[in-house]
Structures are given as C-alpha cells and as structure tokens.
Image (cartoon, grey):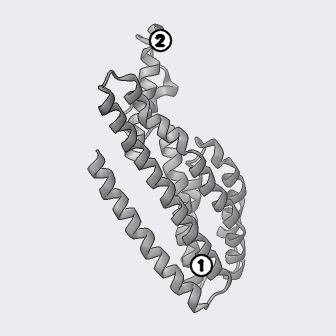
C-alpha cells in the first residue's frame, strides 16, 4: 500500500503545483521530495516509519524477554530510535515520539536488563496510541489514493472500480492494524508474565495468523493493480 501511496502523494502534489501558472518556471526546494525519484514523499515516509516503530518495538519486547544482558538488545533499541526520528512528518505520531524518545535514550544507557525491560514496558501505551493514529490516518490515505481517479475523465464504471480497489486496500490496512494490536497486546501480557505458557502459545498462534494475513493482503493488492 505504501508504494502506491507514495505515487499518489507525488501525483497529487504535482497536480496542485502545476495548477498554479506562476509555478511553471520556479523551483521550490521544500518540494524536492515530491518531485524526486529517490526515496518517498514526506507523508508516506512518516506513515511507513510509524508502522516500522510498532513492529520494531514488538521485536524489542521479544528480544528483552529472551536476552541475558542489556548489550544484546542495543541494536533493537537503536532501530526503534532511528524509526522514531523519521516520523516527524506524521503530526499524529508526535505524542508517541515525545513519550518514546526519552525512554529509548534511557534504555540505551540502562545499567541492568531489568531497568531496560521496565523502561520499554512503560512505552507500550505510546505504541497503542501510534496504532490508533495510523488507523485515524486511513481516510486521508484513501483520499490520496483516489485523488487522480476523481480528477481524470474516466468512464463511470472504471472510476468506481478504481475507488472500490482503493477502499479494499485501505480496509485491509485497518484490519491488519487491528490484528497487530491484538498481537501487541498478547506480547505485552507475555512480557508482564514471563513463563506463562498459555499466553506464549496464544501469541505464537496470533503471530502466525498475522503473517498469513500480511501475505494474503500482499497477493490481493498485486491482483488489484
């Protein structure tokens, strides 16, 4: 979905930019990300990184559960920190950044594994909020995906088909976020009660289902393109 969103975000910005005749022979440095063929435009990059924060934080929790010392979790902590640094363009993610940045910094300097675990668990509510923020962004994602469809003079049936395809893609995104929230909740429960066989078994089942859902959505999206 993010690849298509990047294309749509660029096309929408280009259309708005070119609609102003005074822009015809001008170059605006701040618009470079929209016209460049390198990387992604700012909103898409921020949304992708926001989702990466959630998944890398889940990996961090797993690592801290299995780790024998703080040093072995440094790479996961750095990954979360790097992803946080890239979501500035996603205004709704600002709360998560404000909450998680100091916790990750302190966890990197933690003297014990117990301290690192405590700090990381404190950040879990911010991840819940980030998942909610990603879901709240769905209408804007949908609008970006159908922007050119609404402007192009297509036959009605073709236009409706493209809009329906975009609705399916964004709906799949919401369902996957719901599944990710369930998995993250189970991970927090397992983290809070280490050694709980039932929770860990349920987590393994839910994680397997989530991976299957991601693959199914990927195949469905390819078929829609």
User: Which residue lies at the image location 32% right of the left edge and 55% below the top edge?
Assistant: 220
Q: Nearer the viewer, residue 190 or 140?
A: 140
The spot of residue 117 in percent (x, y) is 67, 77
Residue where numbered disc 1 is placed: 64
* Relative horizontal placement of residue 188, taking residue 10 as reference (left or right): right
Q: Residue furthest top?
A: 22
From the image, tell me which residue sits under label 2. 20
Q: How many marks?
A: 2
> Residue 132: percent from the left, percent from the top?
62, 54
> Marks 1 and 2, Cα distance to the nearest angstrom?
53 Å
Q: Nearer the viewer, residue 106 or 95?
A: 95
Residue 211: x %, y % from top left: 41, 69
Which residue shows up at 67% across the image and 67% down it?
Answer: 124
Splitting the image into 4 quarters, where does residue 184 fall?
Answer: bottom right
Q: Is residue 1 visible?
A: no
Secondary structure category for the residue under label 1: helix
Q: Which residue does the image show at 55% across and 56% down from the upper left?
A: 82
Taking depth in this image into account, of 200 and 217 the one nearest to the observer is 217
Judge the density around disc 2: few (<14), some (14-19), many (≥20) Cα neighbours within 10 Å.
few
């Amino acid at each position: 979905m993010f690849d298509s969103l990047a294309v749509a975000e660029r096309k929408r910005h280009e259309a708005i930019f070119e609609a102003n005749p005074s822009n015809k022979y001008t170059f605006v440095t701040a618009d470079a990300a929209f016209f460049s063929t390198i990387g992604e435009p700012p909103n898409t990059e921020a949304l992708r990184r926001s989702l990466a924060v959630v998944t890398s934080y889940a990996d961090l929790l797993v690592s801290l559960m299995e780790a024998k010392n703080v040093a072995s979790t440094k790479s996961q902590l750095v990954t979360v920190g790097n992803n946080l640094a890239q979501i500035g363009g996603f205004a709704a993610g600002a709360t998560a950044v404000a909450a998680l940045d100091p916790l990750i910094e302190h966890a990197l300097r933690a003297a014990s594994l117990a301290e690192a675990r405590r700090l990381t668990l404190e950040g879990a509510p911010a991840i819940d909020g980030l998942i909610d923020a990603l879901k709240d962004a769905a209408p804007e994602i949908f609008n970006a995906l159908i922007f050119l469809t609404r402007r192009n003079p297509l036959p009605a049936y073709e236009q409706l088909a493209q809009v329906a395809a975009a609705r399916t893609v964004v709906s799949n995104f919401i369902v996957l976020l719901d599944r990710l929230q369930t998995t993250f909740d189970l991970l927090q429960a397992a983290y809070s009660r280490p050694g709980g066989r039932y929770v860990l078994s349920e987590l393994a089942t839910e994680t397997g289902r989530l991976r299957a859902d991601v693959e199914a959505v990927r195949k469905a999206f390819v078929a829609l393109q």
